[in-house]
Image (spheres, rainbow, N blue to C red):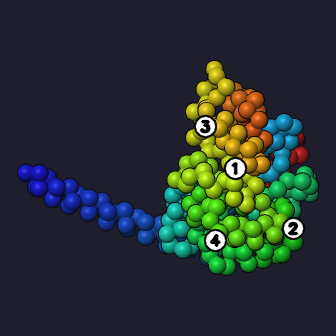
Amino acid sequence: RAKQKGVNQLVYFNTRMVDELRDRSMMLSELKDSLDHQNFTLMYQPQIDLNTLQIVGVEALCRWRNKRNEPISPEVFIPLAEQSGLILALGEWVLHKALEDLHRIRSIKPSVRMAVNVSTLQFNDPDFERVISNALALAGVSGNCLDIEITESVGVLGSVEVEEKLSRLKKLGVMISIDDFGTGFSSLSYLDKLSADQLKIDKSFVSCMNPSNTGSNIADMIVSLGRKFHLTVIAEGIETEAQLNALKAQGCHQGQGYWFSKPLTIDDLLTWLEKT
Ligand code: C2E
Ligand code: MG
Ligand code: MG
Ligand code: MG
């Protein structure tokens, strides 16, 4: 009986898999198409110094609409672009576009830096350093305008291989942030060897901070780790004033989230900058 049930489940699972495969390959061909026609856009979310409340940077976040003009979440199309290798070309487009827009941003606020998400596949591409230095040269901006956001999944942080790559990138002047810090599977033992500049507290650790106490112990712990290892700490997903105040009290340096601003189109960002 159990066996029969197992067989039925297998049949059901297979038809679902066929559907999923079809959807995925359709989405993939639309993604490829969009890349040829540069049908992606970037939104920019301000990153704020929690002490001065001044903007210090913006994070570029990629947006895509399919053929039916439906917005597809980057949580869906980025993994698909990664699995298919398209992320290399997409990631390069993101870098070029973001650095091009940075000129307009800096014409209003000259010190603003650009943070760009880099996927594991991009980071591990042997050409990655050249891609970065070419993008900087093409846009005519110096490396210290750029902040590269990687995650713990790029490899073994703290290992000779990863650290050498990070140091070479840092020679270009770029800053390195560890995105979604604390959600990966790596141990903390790499922190004292890490050639990164910044830890980003994942928004799941910010959203669980409750308004009555000083907040999530994990956010607090990450701020302490940052202090201990001389890393700047930036909290993502700040949605309430209570979260902001708690993070500030803990000594968190920077933050971004709907409380300050949602991700904005370049034009809306420029207007926002003019006003602040
Ligand atoms: P991420 O880099 O951790 O970006 C933070 C996500 O949180 C963004 O989602 C942002 O829109 C969202 N967010 C910001 N503030 C708040 C807030 O106050 N509340 C809530 N609930 N959410 C907030 P988004 O834009 O959907 O991007 C999701 C993920 O997709 C990013 O996570 C990043 O991992 C990836 N991604 C986006 N653009 C790119 C890209 O150009 N390249 C690569 N490789 N990945 C990208
Ligand atoms: Mg990010
Ligand atoms: Mg993140
Ligand atoms: Mg994320």
Can you tell which mark lies on residue 218?
3
From the image, state whether disc 1 or disc 2 is nearer to you: 1
Residue at disc 2, secondary structure = loop
Estimate the spatial distance between the alpha carbons at disc 2 and disc 3, rounded to whole Å.
Answer: 35 Å
Horizontal arrangement in the rendering, residue 83 relative to residue 225 (left or right) = left
Can you tell which mark lies on residue 161?
4
Q: Amino acid at mark 4?
A: Glu
Q: Residues within 10 Å of mark 1 (few under 14, many from 20)?
A: many
Residue at disc 1, secondary structure = strand
Q: Amino acid at mark 2?
A: Ser
Q: Residues within 10 Å of mark 2 (few under 14, many from 20)?
A: few
Residue at disc 3, secondary structure = helix
The residue shown at (50%, 65%) is 80
Looking at marks 2 and 3 on the same chain, the residue that comes earlier in the sequence is marked by 2
Q: In this figure, which residue is indicated by the disc labeled 1?
A: 199
Estimate the spatial distance between the alpha carbons at disc 4 and disc 1, rounded to whole Å.
Answer: 20 Å
Residue 59 image offset from top left, x and y in percent: 73, 54
The residue shown at (58%, 63%) is 156
